[in-house]
Amino acid sequence: MTQSIHGHEVMQMMLSSEQSYTKESLCAEIIAKYGQDSRFHTCSQENMSAEQLVDFLQSRGKFVATQNGFTTSADKICNH
């Protein structure tokens, strides 16, 4: 059975890594951690691939630009 991971977990992974990402490097990190076949969901979307999740999070303003790409911050993660 394919697991579904909440986008908040991915954002927490980003916070704990303390590094900047590009879309490609974040997708690669997500796949390395959760597996190629994992699917992702958020409070309003489900059944997304890693790339779809990254696009969704970016469209919702969940990333913070850095000199080398982007990261996130704790205040970007909703608490519901």
Image (cartoon, rainbow, N blue to C red):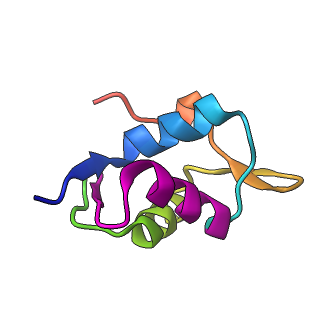
Q: Compared to 78, does 1 lie above or below?
A: below
Q: 51 or 66: nearer the eye?
A: 51
Quadrant of residue 69 within the rendered picture: bottom right
Which residue is at 29% across, 60% downward?
38
Q: Compared to 21, does 49 lie above or below?
A: below
Residue 9 location (% of width, % of height): 40, 39
- Tell whether 65 sits left or right of 40: right
Could you tell me if residue 43 is visible in this image?
no
Which residue is at 49% across, 34% downward?
12
Magenta stretch holds residue 40: yes
Could you tell me if residue 7 is visible in this image?
yes
Q: 2 or 58: nearer the eye?
A: 2
Residue 53 location (% of width, % of height): 41, 63
Magenta stretch holds residue 19: no
Which residue is at 46% across, 60% downward?
31
Residue 64 location (% of width, % of height): 70, 48
Number of numbered discs present? 0
Q: What's the magenta region? A: 24-42
- Tell whether 68 sits left or right of 14: right
Which residue is situated farthest in the left direction here?
1
Which residue is at 22% across, 53% downward?
4
Residue 60 location (% of width, % of height): 49, 58
Q: Quadrant of the C terminus?
A: top left
